[in-house]
Image (cartoon, rainbow, N blue to C red):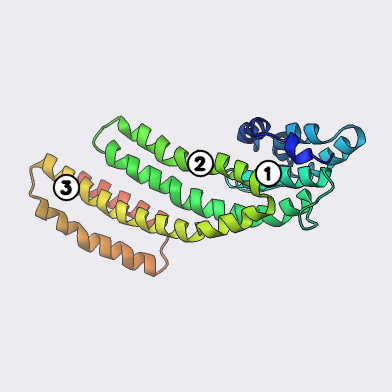
Amino acid sequence: MKNARGQINALLVGRCALRSFLLQASWNFESLQGLGALYVLAPALRCLYQGEERKQAFQRHLGYFNSHPYLGTAILGSAIALEADAAAGNPQDGVSASDFNGMMMAPFAAMGDALFWGGIRPLAAVLALFFAVRGSLLACVVLLMVYNLPHLFFRFWGFFRGWQRGVEIVATIQRWHLPDLAIRIKEAVVILLGGLCAMWVSMMLHDKGLPPAVGFVALPVVGFCCWLARKGVSPLTMIYLGTFLALAVRGLK
């Protein structure tokens, strides 16, 4: 199979990439995403191997796999490239696809969690809230667009790039500085939350016919909450306290 790499065309890789939407469709305690990873790779493995070799290839990828569902596609794309080179008798740097999966899935999971769960998802929610507080249905559109455009880009770009570059996908991901990007997004979310709170207070004052300057009364409350946070008071406790005080003030009226 000297030209095994050539048998894996873009159409077949696209098929595998589409299957990545079902990466998490079959979790189990033994291999976590293992069955889903094999399902993603199955069309490529069927193309590369026949008979007993195909059976062994399926068994290799039936083991443990657990990574971020969006960034993990880059690992699976690289696995196809490594399997194709191995089938052609030209393994990349002596690294097998299963070994590469085992080495990369945890770092990619950590980067993906920080970027998507800790950064892009809150960012999408905050941007959508700017429209939601005004009663605009665009909030749903903004939420889905801001979250899914990066998600779909990394899912498909990562898969195809991994197929093209093999183990070099690691250097490509490193150049993107994703952990730093996640931190910058989190900082932006905090700033946007401050702006959202200010806009919300301004709208409420306008509805009550009060001047915007009254909103500065909230500053001591914000400072008090910051002091409580520095003292180790949990956010949930502060939410309960704020809700109780709001209900008490409303009851006095």
Q: Nearer the viewer, residue 91 or 20?
A: 91
Find disc 3 in the rendering and name its residue. Answer: 202
User: Is 186 left, or right, of 39 in this rendering?
Assistant: left
Find disc 2 in the rendering and name its residue. Answer: 153
Q: Amino acid at mark 3?
A: Ser
Find residue 233 and report its image quarter.
bottom left
Q: Residue at x 73, y 53 (%)?
A: 100
The spot of residue 215 in percent (x, y) is 15, 54
Callout 1 crowding tier (Cα within 10 Å): few <14, some 14–19, many ≥20: many
Callout 2 crowding tier (Cα within 10 Å): few <14, some 14–19, many ≥20: few
Report how far apart the C-alphas of labels 3 and 1 lie in the structure: 49 Å
Find disc 1 in the rendering and name its residue. Answer: 76
The spot of residue 231 in percent (x, y) is 39, 70
Q: Amino acid at mark 2?
A: Phe
User: Is 184 left, or right, of 62 in this rendering?
Assistant: left
Q: Nearer the viewer, residue 21 or 249?
A: 21
Q: Amino acid at mark 1?
A: Leu
Closer to the camera: disc 2 or disc 3?
2
Report how far apart the C-alphas of labels 2 and 3 lie in the structure: 37 Å
Dots 2, 3 in contact, CB < 8 A: no
